[in-house]
Amino acid sequence: MARIAFVVVEPFADWEPALLAAVAREDFGDQVSWWSPGGRPVPSIGGMTIQVHGALEDFSTDQAEALVLIGSPLWMTAASPDLTPLLRRAADAGLVVAGICGATLALARAGLLDDCAHTSNALDFLQQHVPAYRGAAHYRPGARAVRGGRIVTASGSAPTSFASEVLGALHPEATKSLSEFVTEFGREHQPA
């Protein structure tokens, strides 16, 4: 069993954590918790509101094995929370640190993408929103999530492979079942 802490800011992209949270709980018996700046409830892009378990300011790296940031248009603005100290502490403590869609910007701002394989919505997306980003040589274009050590990144259109890569980092013994999971959930994208 692993503990996965999701970080959401408003309005979060509700489709991005859904598969990961559900499969983690149902198939792996993992514990899932939700965190937000200030511990406030967070509305999603789709109109639902999540009641979080705690304030991000109170989160400690000994409370989880993975810290997963979910996308939101807020990450692309000056109002985006600066999570650099927390993300660096999490990475230094050996947590899986993951970001999908706009949340990859927070990982880039923290310098976590400078030296490992990663992806995002696009290379120019990272370069435009994070002038200090220095990881272009490690950027991997493509439709699937990328795992570079304990860092997992994905575009907003890759929640299935994102779930698989985060769970693969937490449960390395589950390679076969995670491969089957990706095949099953990717079936709708195959030619008829």
Image (spheres, rainbow, N blue to C red):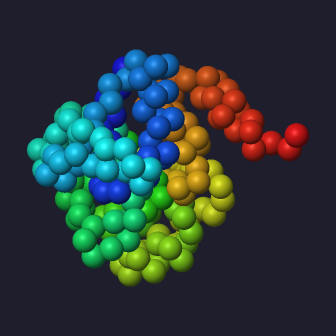
Residue 58 appears anywhere in the view = yes
Quadrant containing the N terminus is: top left
Quarter of the image containing the C terminus? top right
The residue at 37%/23% (across/down) is 30
x and y percentages locating residue 92 in the rendered image: 26, 49
Q: Nearer the viewer, residue 47 or 93?
A: 47
Whether 75 is drawn above or below 180: the answer is below
Q: Say which quarter of the image contains residue 17.
A: top left
- Counting the numbered discs, the total is 0
The residue at 39%/59% (across/down) is: 72
- In depth, the one of 5 and 92 nearer the eye is 5
Q: Position of residue 15 (x, y in %)?
A: 49, 45
| Image: 79 above or below 128 | above
Residue 114 at x, y percent in the picture: 42, 67
Residue 79 in the image, given as x and y percentages of width and height: 25, 71
What residue is shown at x 51% (from left), y 35% (from top)?
19
